Amino acid sequence: MNHISRRSFLGTLGAGTVAIHARRRTAQPNIVLFVMDDLGTGDAGCYGNPVIKTPGLDQLAANGTRFTHAFCTTASCSASRSVMLTGLYNHANGQYGHMHSFHHFATFDHVRALPTLLSAAGYRTFRTGKYHVAPAHVYAFDGHITAEGASPEERATQCRTIMTARDARPFFLYFCTQEPHRPFLRGGSAPVDPADVIVPPYLPDLDATRQELAHYYMSVERADKGLVRLIDLLKATAHWNNTVVVAVSDNGIAFPGAKTTLYEPGMRLPCVVRRPELLPGVCDAMITWADLVPTLCDIAQADSPAVHGRSFKRAMEERTPPGWDEVYASHTFHEVTMYYPMRVVRTRRHKLLWNLAHGLSYPFASDLFASATWQAVRAEGHTHYGRRHIEDYVHRPMFELYDLESDPHEVHNLAADTALADPLKHKLRAFQERTGDPWIVKWTYE
């Protein structure tokens, strides 16, 4: 196979953006979509963390494309997964929040999801691990690899039957870990010393925080073992060179200030894509999980319905492709008791957040409120949580506008600067019009 890389072209032609066109594959590749639960950006070796051991993600990045600006569109488990499997923002697909228990949100019946699209294109489709979307007939897979209570590594081992089946059709495997979701399952991982963890600026550097982060690191490593095992199996079954592997997280780390928020720690996430025909590289395109369906359909040579995302198959063949410089986010619920709709437009430099329910106090997910870190902040009477004042976190204005170059931690609200805010508000409203957002009425009567 002839491989084409960004690096070889840049080394030959010099500095600057160079379009790299990969040779089109004639056969449909197998596809693995590996989704970790609540993994934040920067929380892997290939994203610059020297403490967490993530040989699976690191190997994938060493053989694939590491995205630097990848974003979920809603920082909540069910809602985010519905976007990555439909290509539609959750305000349009109907999966506004959690599907399980009394939350009972579900995607509209007419929506066509990725497994059915790939099945129509001749794929065998399988899922294993966390499902967390509904209804089943919308997200219909041919098979379900069951391994209740199994570790990601054990679950991956049971996927060998997919790879060794005597079936000429390509396969699509949707592999979801429970880790590193709270309560930070960490069996099989070596202990991490709390003194060694890296406390990010959006969290307070407390003993409780370090202890929780140490457990989180171990849970990340447990999840990564599943990816290591899958890669080993793909190589052992001679599928490594005809399989596209995509590894992402559904939303940010499960701490207040990240998960359930549309601040950077909640929505900016790891994304590594390994396509066999491309040599390793880094891509700065700003992509979202709404782009996964059209991209994977493009790679699979499958028909894709009209969706909100677009294919980044060609974009990932350049370091900094033109036209990939802004993204949008739309969050409505997490738990059913957590109504706090937010809409976001983010450019390379600025982010505008519209808090549609700004009159309400910001709601806490039950497990985030119970975290030892948050409880320690409350018990010790701290005024700040990380870089942000607690009062600003709990009681938010209608609009928040941040200059991410000068204020990467989103502390200084510039929304009063109308020259800066108004063009972004126009972009946000146009996005709502394009995507059929019911909450667009808030511009009229609030």
Image (spheres, rainbow, N blue to C red):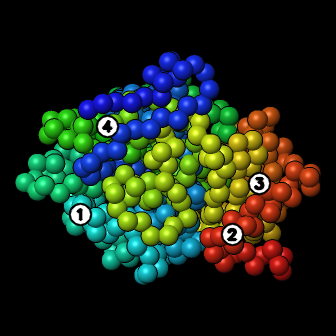
Q: Nearer the viewer, mark 2 or mark 4?
A: 4
165, 299: nearer the viewer: 299
Specify whether residue 45 is in view: yes
Circle 2 is placed at which residue position? 432
Q: Residue at x 59, y 68 (%)?
A: 333
Q: Position of residue 430 (x, y in %)?
A: 73, 67
Residue extending farthest to the left is 166
Q: CA distance from mark 2 to mark 3?
A: 14 Å
Give the SS element for disc 2. Answer: helix
Residue 21 against residue 193 in the figure, above or below: below
The residue identified by callout 1 is: 122
Q: Is residue 87 above or below residue 175?
A: below
Q: Which residue is mark 4?
A: 276
- Which residue position is annotated with label 3? 352
* Upstream in sequence: badge 4 or badge 1: 1
Instruction: List x then y, in percent, for residue 168.
Output: 13, 55
Q: Position of residue 196 (x, y in %)?
A: 52, 23
Query: Image quarter for residue 352?
Result: bottom right
- Mark pair 4, 3: CA separation: 37 Å
Q: Amino acid at mark 4?
A: Pro
Instruction: Pick the residue in front: 110 or 302.
Output: 302
Marks 4 and 3, the one that precedes in the sequence: 4
Name the amino acid type tagged 3. Leu
Distance between the alpha carbons at the discs numbered 2 and 4: 37 Å
Left or right of 218 on screen, residue 253: right
Labelled pair 1, 3 in contact (Cβ < 8 Å): no
Tell which circle, 2 or 4, labels the residue nearer the N-terminal end.
Answer: 4
Corner quadrant of residue 443: bottom right
Q: Residues within 10 Å of mark 1 (few under 14, many from 20)?
A: some
Task: Nearest to the eye among marks 1 and 2: give it.
Answer: 1
